[in-house]
């Protein structure tokens, strides 16, 4: 697999425009109601592949395309429905952000771009609370380098160090896990194929500081792996997928207080349409749900979230009542419920990103396509 899209258009940095919300409309399926909070128009961004960061009802995110020069944007969506483009990428400062954002207590935002930067291999960037963007690291576009084409987001430790993955680069050009601290980037691990290849998802850390993630290929069966990187830097394969239990895990993982890991695979399972899985602390993998590829959804590309009752929530890129993807819930007992099936029109289509949940139980996310201008949406699903 190669990196996503080649960039062919240039843009200027720092475009900022405020636009009114497209009038919301509601579509009801079963007991859930979907409302489009914003529909992208191209100039305001297009193809939001990542989910949203919720800061007290104000949402922040990225679009893979669009903006003033078509290299993607960082945007803010206010509680009043106004969308503001905080940054339009110009390739030199990064291009084509695939992942979402994280923030700190000072109001800074951090993210990655899969292309662009000083060397063309993507960037790690910071946007200060005053809107100033800084490229913290530019990856090289060379096999054997410090990594290239980061398509996943970041995590941040208590000391402010950032951790992430690159899809390519490293000693075998099979991707890396990296650390960025005080302006210096360190490759923690270079994948070699047998231990995984091409990490597409982000990382999660446990209470001891161990890192966990997925690779979309590699491992004993070439169907991808779940891996662990210990605090001392040693990498081990926690679980190699074998097809029937899932394959091609695009998304990263979440963990609970008991040390269980949860995630999705885009393919594999009983029908080949993907799975939701759980890995216990002893390494035992359980398939919680195999998607049938039709009404229950197909091809999940997003990570999951978990509520206080043990329910898991996520999205599928296809399937559902109209074939344009779903938002689903899996109960603590393993029952899957489709909360919403996208119709593929103004309500959005083909979600790739995870959802976030507020205290009232509302879910918020993005669709990569659909909406009034067919450039993607930000949506809310009420319980």
Image: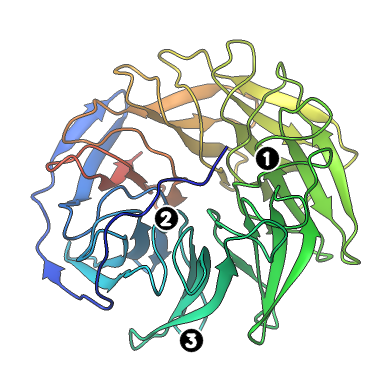
Side of 349 relative to 282 (left or right) = left
Q: Residue at x 27, y 39 (%)?
A: 369
Q: Is residue 180 above or below residue 342?
A: below
Q: Is residue 136 above or below residue 334?
A: below
Q: Which residue is mark 2?
A: 358
From this viewpoint, is residue 259 visible?
Answer: no
Q: Nearer the viewer, mark 2 or mark 1?
A: 1
Q: Is residue 49 above or below residue 283?
A: below
Measure how far apart labels 3 and 1 are at the Cα level: 30 Å
Indicate the quadrant containing the C terminus: top left, top right, bottom left or bottom right.
top left
User: Residue 106 got which mark?
Assistant: 3
Which of disc 3 and disc 2 is earlier in sequence?
3
For mark 1, give the secondary structure: strand
Q: Percent x, y for residue 67?
A: 23, 62
Viewer-closest of 102 and 85: 85
Q: Which residue is mark 1?
A: 262
Q: Percent x, y for residue 288?
A: 66, 25
Marks 1 and 2: in contact by CB < 8 Å? no
Which of disc 1 and disc 3 is earlier in sequence?
3
- Residue 296, picture quadrant: top left
């Amino acid at each position: 697999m190669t990196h996503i899209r080649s960039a062919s258009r240039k843009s200027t940095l720092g475009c900022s425009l405020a636009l009114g919300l497209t009038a919301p409309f509601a579509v009801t399926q079963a007991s859930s109601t979907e409302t489009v909070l914003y529909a992208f128009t191209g100039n305001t961004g297009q193809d939001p592949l990542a989910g949203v960061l919720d800061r007290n009802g104000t949402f922040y995110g990225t679009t893979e395309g669009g903006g003033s020069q078509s290299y993607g944007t960082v945007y803010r969506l206010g509680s009043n429905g106004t969308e503001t483009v905080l940054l339009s990428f110009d390739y030199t400062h990064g291009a084509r952000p695939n992942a979402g954002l994280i923030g700190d207590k000072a109001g800074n935002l951090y993210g990655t771009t899969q292309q662009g930067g000083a060397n063309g291999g993507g960037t790690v960037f910071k946007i200060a609370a005053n809107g100033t963007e800084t490229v913290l690291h530019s990856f090289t576009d060379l096999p054997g380098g410090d990594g290239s084409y980061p398509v996943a987001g970041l995590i941040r430790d208590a000391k402010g160090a950032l951790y992430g993955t690159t899809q390519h680069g490293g000693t075998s050009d099979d991707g890396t896990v990296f650390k960025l601290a005080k302006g210096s980037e360190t490759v923690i691990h270079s994948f070699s194929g047998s231990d995984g290849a091409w990490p597409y998802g982000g990382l999660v850390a446990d209470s001891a500081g161990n890192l966990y993630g997925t690779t979309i290929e590699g491992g004993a069966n070439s169907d991808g792996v779940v891996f662990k990187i210990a605090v001392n830097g040693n990498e081990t394969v926690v679980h190699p997928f074998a097809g029937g239990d899932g394959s091609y895990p695009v998304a990263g993982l979440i963990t609970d207080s008991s040390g269980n890991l949860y995630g999705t695979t885009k393919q594999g399972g009983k029908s080949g349409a993907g799975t939701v899985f759980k890995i216990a602390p002893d390494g035992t993998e359980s398939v919680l749900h195999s998607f049938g590829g039709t009404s229950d959804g197909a091809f999940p590309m997003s990570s999951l979230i978990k509520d206080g009752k043990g329910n898991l929530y996520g999205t599928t890129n296809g399937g559902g009542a109209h074939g344009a993807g779903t938002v689903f819930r899996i109960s603590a007992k393993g029952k899957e419920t489709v909360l919403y099936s996208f119709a593929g029109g103004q309500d959005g289509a083909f979600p790739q990103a995870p959802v976030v949940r507020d205290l009232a139980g509302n879910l918020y996310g993005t669709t990569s396509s659909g909406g009034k201008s067919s450039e993607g949406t930000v949506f809310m699903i009420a319980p």
